[in-house]
Amino acid sequence: MIETPTEQDALDAYSTIVTSVAEKVLPSVASLRIGRGGRGSGGAGSGVVITPDGFLVTSAHVVAAGGTASATFIDGTEYQVDIVGADPLSDLAIVRARSADLHPARIGDADRLRVGQLVVAIGNPMGFSGSVTSGVVSGLGRSLATADGNGHRRFVEDVIQTDAALNPGNSGGALSDSKAQLIGVNTAVAGMGLGLAVPINSTTQAILSALMRSGRVRRAYLGIAGGTRPLPPSVAERLGRRAGVEVHEVVAGSPAENAKLRGGDVIVSVGDVGVSKAGDLQRLMVEAKIGSRIPLTVLRADQLLSLDVVPIELK
């Protein structure tokens, strides 16, 4: 006869997982101080080591004040830090500690997360270093509004929502799964019991690679504002998808205007890749698309049209 686990057994198992994750991830999480000598009032937050030679990922808003910085680890070691690059439109940044012997976190894949899955948040809230909280994935596919300081507004798509307690100072810290893999960078406290984290997946890893390589992220620009619109049943059946991206506005003089896109058009594919929401378009507007001629499939009234657009670099 198989015995049913007791509530105490379940709690012990939960505690064992959280303890194990904390032991593995804590050495990779630093308290960051941004400002004069790394000790000023410029800013503070957390960072996570992702390479043994000193690269850490953090939140762009943590390093926005610029200047010098310092990173302090749970064992008390402290290093001067150089800000390598920041991407406000994804709220991700890369800094580099002046050390070649750090403990990198294991990188996971947030695209494999499921709602209800256990997650552990590690950071330095309110200046309390090495703080650990746990909870579950409350939602996936959320949007987080960001801006780059130059008037460009963007929604970071597929943000992870969690009920693991987050407070000021957690930004830039680790969100890990039960296998102690880094699957998110804590970025915002959205309300009581509600935290958000930028996912670590193929899209954001490309952003981090660009920041490590050149200190910035180059993006292609179409010049539209849009949102999801359901496709008519006949078109949905023909294309094998339910929605496209409706063009709400076309910016004057933009590549979209030059391509003859109009308000009310519904973009259903870019090249041979289907799109159904604004985030799909944003993910496709990578550096390689700048200056390239790209075919768009567009639903206008009841007709599918093919239009060519040549994106420019987003400034």
Image (cartoon, rainbow, N blue to C red):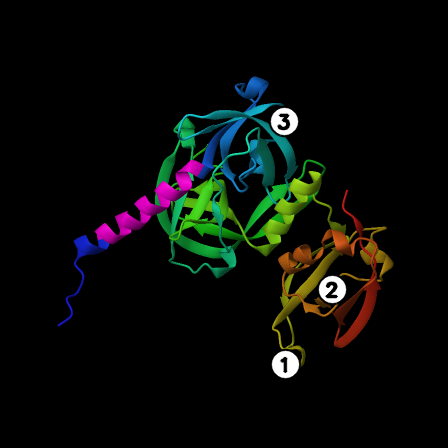
Look at label 1 and name its amino acid: Glu
Foreground of the two, 176 or 49:
49
Element assignment for label 1 = helix
In the picture of the structure, the residue carrying the numbered disc 2 is 264
Quadrant that contains the C terminus: top right
Q: Nearer the viewer, mark 2 or mark 3?
A: 3
In the picture of the structure, the residue carrying the numbered disc 1 is 237
Foreground of the two, 97 or 247:
97
Residue that lies at the very extreme toward the front in this rendered image: 101
Task: Report the span colored magenta.
Answer: 11-27
Per the picture, the main secondary structure of the magenta-coloured stretch is helix
Foreground of the two, 24 or 46:
24
Say which label, 2 or 3, has the lower sequence index.
3
Residue 30's disc number: none
Residue at 51% in and 39% down: 49
Q: Is residue 178 above or below residue 235?
A: above
Q: Do the residues labelled 1 and 2 touch (CB within 8 Å)?
A: no
Q: Can residue 51 be seen in this view?
A: yes
Q: Which of marks 1 and 2 is in front?
A: 1
Position of residue 111 measured from the top left corner of the image (x, y, whole percent): 51, 59
Say which label, 1 or 2, has the lower sequence index.
1
Q: How crowded is mark 3: few (under 14 residues within 10 Å), some or many (20 or more)?
A: some
Q: Is residue 166 visible?
A: no
In the picture of the structure, the residue carrying the numbered disc 3 is 66
Foreground of the two, 312 or 95:
95
Q: Is residue 129 above or below residue 247?
A: above
Alpha-carbon span between mark 1 and mark 2:
21 Å
